Image (cartoon, rainbow, N blue to C red):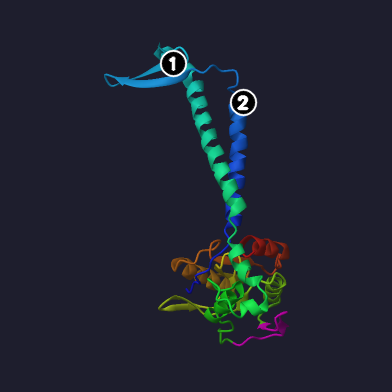
């Protein structure tokens, strides 16, 4: 499979990580509230003659008191508190660092430096990386569409003025077109030296540069059709193209038509 050397804006990923760290910090602060009335005693653990020994250590008086086995259960709260305090410090440091990175790091600014030039300057400047449109144009050359030579029957024509095999494929194509997502219909995909398939769509995520494939399974209630396509999915998986990571699937049957809302959600999840 062809891949472009595409510099993408990973700010969204950083923001997702920051949101997760923020959630953990709220949980951590809530945990710390349970210890607000506890003293500053900490637990000291040592080993003597192969036996684990516990001590309560008073930091201010610098005194260490042995904890008998019968009282060990009472020191768990100190061990848990010390852990929660350290984790809170780590989370706070990560949160501060990530916040600064998110505020300062926007790879998209590199593209904008060239895109915002007037035409006279654009004619002179040699950009350090290809423009996004140049990447898209290159992607189209790497993934030519309409490679399946099996005749297309029917009159389903997309907004991009291309013929497709079903009403559902037209719906998917038109939704991709509406969101201005680069796609091609029925490219040839070499899974191995001996196996080629024609996915319904190859699609480029303009934010990340990643190529996805989309298969619409339109007759899963038909046994022969279902078996044929399940075998096709096995070929994808066997050759490293995994559903949910590289391959997007939509399904309908005789009694269940294409769920347009789900298609829209998948487009937003994978392709925007």
Nearer to us in this view, 258 or 86:
86
Tell whether position 125 is magenta: no
17 is higher (above) or lower (below) than 82:
below
In the picture, the disc for residue 56 is 1
Please tell me whether residue 75 is drawn above or below residue 245 in the rendered image.
Answer: above
Can the viewer see residue 218?
A: no
x then y, percent, for residue 205: 60, 67
At a point 51% along the width and 37% down the height, the residue shown is 90
Q: Residue 157, position in %: x, y?
A: 71, 82
Q: Which residue is mark 2?
A: 33
Q: Looking at the image, is mark 2 or mark 1 earlier in the sequence?
A: 2
Taking 170 as reference, is 240 left or right? left
| Span of residues in magenta | 151-163
161 or 219: nearer the eye?
161
Displayed quadrant of residue 240: bottom left
Left or right of residue 165: residue 50:
left
| C-alpha separation, residue under disc 2 versus residue under disc 1 | 22 Å
Against 171, residue 16 (above or below) is: above
**Quarter of the image where the C terminus is located:** bottom right
Where residue 149 sits: x, y (%)? 56, 87
């Amino acid at each position: 499979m062809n891949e472009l050397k595409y510099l993408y804006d990973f700010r969204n990923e950083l923001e997702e990580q920051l949101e997760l760290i923020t959630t953990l910090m709220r949980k951590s602060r809530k945990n710390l509230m349970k210890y607000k009335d506890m003293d500053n005693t900490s637990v000291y653990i040592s080993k003597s003659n192969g036996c684990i020994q516990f001590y309560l250590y008073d930091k201010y008086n610098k005194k260490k008191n042995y904890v008998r086995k019968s009282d060990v259960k009472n020191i768990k709260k100190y061990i848990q508190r010390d852990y929660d305090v350290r984790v809170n410090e780590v989370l706070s440091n990560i949160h501060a660092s990530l916040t600064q990175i998110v505020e300062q790091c926007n790879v998209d600014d590199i593209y904008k430096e060239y895109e915002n030039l007037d035409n006279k300057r654009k004619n002179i400047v040699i950009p350090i990386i290809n423009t996004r449109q140049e990447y898209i144009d290159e992607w189209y050359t790497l993934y030519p569409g309409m490679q399946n030579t099996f005749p297309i029957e029917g009159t389903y024509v997309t907004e991009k003025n291309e013929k497709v095999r079903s009403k559902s494929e037209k719906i998917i194509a038109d939704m991709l077109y509406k969101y201005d997502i680069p796609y091609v219909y029925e490219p040839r995909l070499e899974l191995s030296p001996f196996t080629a398939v024609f996915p319904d769509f190859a699609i480029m995520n303009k934010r990340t540069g990643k190529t996805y494939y989309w298969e619409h399974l339109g007759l899963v209630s038909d046994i022969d059709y279902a078996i044929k396509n399940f075998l096709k999915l096995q070929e994808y998986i066997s050759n490293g193209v995994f559903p949910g990571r590289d391959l997007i699937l939509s399904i309908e049957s005789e009694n269940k038509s294409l769920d347009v809302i789900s298609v829209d959600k998948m487009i937003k999840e994978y392709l925007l």
